Image (spheres, rainbow, N blue to C red):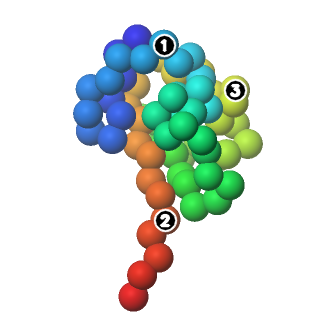
Amino acid sequence: MNITLNDEPVTTTADTLEALLVDHLGTIPAAGLAVAVDGVVVPRSRWSSHLLVDGCVVDILSAVQGG
């Protein structure tokens, strides 16, 4: 399926948000990560069950610490 991931077109075989994150990141950090699909934040508890659809827009945001 074709999706947009962080403003870049991507072709993926991942069918869930969790599978996409593992494909893209390798491992999912324990904290400091937020994900939105089509502009709606998906709670971490639903990443494994949130199904992706062709054409969806996924934004992965990570917390950055600094001063």
Tag in front: 1 or 3: 1
Height in image: 11 above or below 57? above
Contact (Cβ within 8 Å) of mark 2 with mark 1: no
- Using the image, tell me which numbered label, if any, was put on residue 13: 1
Task: Work out how far the residue at label 3 is from the one at label 2, CA to CA, in angstroms.
Answer: 23 Å
Q: Which residue is tagged 2?
A: 63
Q: Is 20 left or right of 50, judged from the image as shown? A: left
Q: Residues within 10 Å of mark 3 (few under 14, many from 20)?
A: few
Q: Residues within 10 Å of mark 2 (few under 14, many from 20)?
A: few
Task: Work out how far the residue at label 1 is from the one at label 3, CA to CA, in angstroms.
Answer: 15 Å
Contact (Cβ within 8 Å) of mark 1 with mark 3: no
Report the residue at 69% width, 36% height from top: 46
- Using the image, tell me which numbered label, if any, was put on residue 39: none
Which image quadrant is residue 48 in? top right
Residue 15, given in percent of the width and then of the height, sits at 56, 17
Q: Is 60 left or right of 47, judged from the image as shown? A: left
Report the residue at 64% width, 59% height from top: 31
Question: Mark 2 or mark 3, which is nearer the start of the sequence?
Answer: 3
Height in image: 2 above or below 46? above
* Kind of residue sitting beneath label 2: Ala
Height in image: 31 above or below 21? below
Report the residue at 53% width, 18% height from top: 14
* Kind of residue sitting beneath label 3: Ser
Report the residue at 61% width, 44% height from top: 28
Residue 66, given in percent of the width and then of the height, sits at 42, 81
- Using the image, tell me which numbered label, if any, was put on residue 49: 3
